[in-house]
Each structure stands twice: as structure tokens, then as C-alpha cells.
Image (spheres, rainbow, N blue to C red):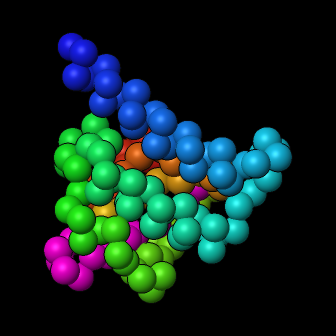
């Protein structure tokens, strides 16, 4: 029970730290696609430091050293971005769901976010 609570708390801390960085002045302005790419890479790097509690566990250390070219916008929807972050060393792609205000909502290896439909 304590381990689950700690994991959930760490996940919230990780996700909120990016929200704070994207919103230093606490406005809710729309972020650019380039900002979404940067946020996704930063989140993936943090997921290599801690298990985010999203079902895939802590990412391998190889996720920490990805280039800017490793990420791209897969979907630019109404109020959100789906950003893919590809790790050639692992031959895997992690998809990160980010709001257009910079909040990170979810991440997975399928790129499918059923609540968007």
C-alpha cells in the first residue's frame, strides 16, 4: 500500500514538474509543437529515473540520451498533442499525451489513448 502511494506521488511530482516549467508565469497559454516535443523528451528522461506507475515500469537508462530528432508530433488534436519518442537502441517508441497547455496526461507504447475518442 505504501509503495503504491509513493509511486503515485512520484508520478504526480514528475508530471507536475513539467507543468510548472511550462507555466512559470501560471498562465494557461497554448504551447508550441516544439515545446510539446521538449516536454515529451524531458518526461521520458524522468521515466528512466523512476517508475511512473503507468504499467511499463522504469525505462532503461538509454532513454536519457535521446536526440532532438527522436521525438515528433504524431497527432495535433483539439487541445492536445500525441508525441512519439523513439529509442533506436531499445527499438521502442513511447507515446506521450500532452495538453496544449503543457500538462502531461498519459504515456504508453501503443500510441492509443481511448479517452480521446
Q: Residue furthest top?
A: 1
User: Looking at the image, which is closer to me, 91 or 63?
Assistant: 63
Please determine whether, in this image, residue 78 is positioned above or below residue 68.
Answer: above
User: Looking at the image, which is closer to me, 71 or 48?
Assistant: 48
107 to the left or right of 57: right
Residue at figure coordinates x 31%, y 52% from the top left: 49
Q: Residue 71, how many percent across, how many down?
A: 44, 76
Q: Is residue 75 magenta?
A: no
Please determine whether, in this image, residue 44 is positioned above or below residue 70.
Answer: above
Q: Residue furthest bottom?
A: 69
Q: Is residue 81 magenta?
A: yes
The quadrant holding residue 46 is: bottom left
Residue at figure coordinates x 31%, y 20% from the top left: 5
Please determine whether, in this image, residue 44 is positioned above or below residue 12.
Answer: below
Please determine whether, in this image, residue 115 is positioned above or below residue 73.
Answer: above
Q: Residue 16, how many percent across, how many down?
A: 55, 40
User: Looking at the image, which is closer to me, 63 or 91?
Assistant: 63
The quadrant holding residue 84 is: bottom left
The main secondary structure of the magenta stretch is strand
Q: Residue furthest left?
A: 90
Quadrant of the snapshot with the N terminus: top left
Residue at figure coordinates x 79%, y 53% from the top left: 29
Q: Residue 116, how many percent across, how many down?
A: 47, 47
Residue 54 in sight: no
Magenta range is 79-92
Q: Residue 13, how many percent across, how many down?
A: 48, 36
Q: How many circles with numbers are drawn on the protein?
A: 0
The quadrant holding residue 70 is: bottom left
Residue 87 in sight: yes
Residue at figure coordinates x 20%, y 46% from the top left: 57
86 to the left or right of 60: right
Amino acid at each position: 500500500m505504501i509503495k503504491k502511494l509513493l509511486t503515485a506521488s512520484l508520478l504526480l511530482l514528475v508530471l507536475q514538474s513539467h507543468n510548472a516549467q511550462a507555466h512559470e508565469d501560471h498562465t494557461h497559454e497554448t504551447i508550441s509543437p516544439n515545446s510539446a516535443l521538449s516536454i515529451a523528451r524531458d518526461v521520458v528522461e524522468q521515466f528512466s529515473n523512476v517508475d511512473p506507475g503507468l504499467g511499463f515500469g522504469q525505462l532503461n537508462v538509454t532513454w536519457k540520451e535521446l536526440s532532438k530528432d527522436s521525438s515528433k508530433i504524431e497527432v495535433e488534436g483539439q487541445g492536445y498533442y500525441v508525441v512519439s519518442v523513439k529509442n533506436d537502441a531499445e527499438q521502442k517508441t513511447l507515446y506521450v499525451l500532452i495538453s496544449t497547455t503543457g500538462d502531461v496526461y498519459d504515456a504508453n507504447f501503443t500510441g492509443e489513448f481511448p479517452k480521446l475518442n
